[in-house]
Image: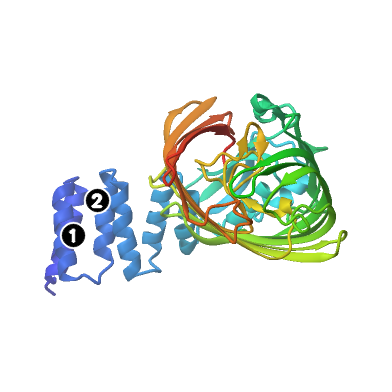
Amino acid sequence: MAQSPADSDYQHGLNFARQGQWEEARQSFQAGERKQPREARFPIELAGVAFKQNQFALAKGYLHRALALAPADGYANEFLGTIYLLEDNLEAALRYWNRAGRPRIKNVEFEPPPALNPVLLDRALAFAPASFLRLSDLEASRARLESLDVFSRLRFDLEARTEDIFDLVLHASERSAWSRSSLISMLIGLPYETVYPEFYNLRRSSSNLVSLIRWDAQKRRAFVGWAGPVGTGATWRYRFYADGRNENWQLAGLAPGSFNLRKAEISGEVSSLEGGRWNWSSGAAVSRRDFRSALVSGLPPDVLLANASLLKYRGSMHGWLLRVPEKRFTLASGAVVQYGRILTGGASSFARSEGSLDARWFPQARGDDYSMRVSLRGGKTWGDIPFDELVQLGLERDNDLPMRAHIGTLDGRKGHAPLGRDYLLLNWEQDKALYRSPVISVKLGPFLDSGHLFHPVAGLAPGKWMWDAGVQCKLVVFGTAVATLSYGRDLRSGGNAFYVGRSW
């Protein structure tokens, strides 16, 4: 029986490929594909030609085209997974290997062996030796290990034992009381009169103590937090916090004035992981705030600056909306709800809801020489809130809502950045690795911030959208983010801001 024209092109392509004549093979397979565009065999063979020429991006494109035509093709799925594994993209490799019934793992190894309790470590892993490794199990294991807050870096690798059997190796940098990264983390605040004593994995139980001590005369603070697992599991954790502050505030804008805020708070919460994609927490806090030497015009002191005790409930949920390992893109989301009851000085209550989206993208097939991050956050309040529950858009060491051309302090006193009840904030940044070594890494890139405070209190914030643009340099030592040096320009007022702080 005579071959069809497409079959003839296919056979010619195979013959050219066996002889290493890659360009002729490519032309033959392309000719056959034009005649039979619904046949998956042609893009599969074109992927093989591109792979032999080390054109991995082109090979992946052909294989994705083939799988769009034949999603269950075992060879195409295995081939595509292999390319992703060669690019050190294990998550993408598993997505396609799992469709072909791979990989089987024989052993789970740790380099270096962690000091964590073996029972806790075993329960943190959602897979076992001599089993089939699923992508969902890898994601769940990573989430559990990260939630222990014992490892500063985690990386899973597959090492082949035979063609079909692998060992799974976990490379982890473990935090400890006197490790180099812990010492660096503790001392990085010395230029601004702060230390961060941190002690991890106490008694090998993933119980961690973190603290902050600041002796700045304008904003003294002492904070301590304790966290650990519930029992010997790796999905439930508890946390307790104690926080005390003595801060001098100097307000600007249409409500000038100054006061001293003293606040003490204790809180606790419990959290749980649901698979490898979602976690939730629930907790409560009780606090007392006192405002002293208040000389403020334009603010309603009976509401904002009243000495009061507060009981507050907080619940949150965070997780992944989208993970595309082939594109090295993730989109995370979060939601927080709070309800507070003022217990003294005329009982009243308030509520707050907040939401967030956080997108990250590494545009290259491997490594992190380039990265991009976009974060969108917003919040809404109801009822009467005390002054310390207002949100601040700006750069300040106790604030996590940055506008990088708005410094939150003036002469060391808080109150210089915009303040309000409800907000919307967009942060965009891009990084390029300038220098990398086992000890130190330097990244540089532009940023753009846009924020708006709705219902500002007595002129403590502008009524317009704020726009900040600039450039920042990040310094990382032994895998620990040490400092970020930024220059920002307020695109509305033309003001400039230089700032050195921790990465957001």
Between disc 1 and disc 2, whose residue precedes? 1
Q: Is residue 28 visible?
A: yes
Q: Is residue 484 left or right of residue 281?
A: left
In front here: 487 or 121? 487
Q: Give the residue type at disc 1.
A: Phe
Residue drawn at (59%, 61%) of the image: 455
Residue 419, image x, y percentages: 62, 51
Residue 415, image x, y percentages: 64, 43
In front here: 357 or 99? 357
Q: Which numbered marker is on residue 29?
A: 1
Q: Give the residue type at disc 2.
A: Val
Q: CA distance from mark 1 to mark 2?
A: 10 Å
Residue drawn at (26%, 49%) of the image: 50
Element under label 2?
helix
Residue 213, image x, y percentages: 76, 32
In front here: 335 or 114? 335
Residue drawn at (28%, 51%) of the image: 58
Q: Is residue 8 left or right of residue 288?
A: left
Q: Name the residue tied to disc 2.
A: 49
Task: Look at the picture and state if 398 lies above or below 476.
Answer: below
Q: How was the colour assigned to the protein in this rendering?
A: rainbow
How many marks are shown on the rendered structure? 2
Residue 182, image x, y percentages: 69, 30
State which quarter of the image contains the C terminus.
top right
State which quarter of the image contains the N terminus.
bottom left
Q: Are marks 1 and 2 in contact (CB under 8 Å)?
A: yes
Q: Is residue 472 left or right of residue 259?
A: left
Q: Is residue 274 visible?
A: no
- Would you call the spot at circle 1 few (<14 residues within 10 Å), some (14-19), or many (20 or more)? many
Element under label 1?
helix
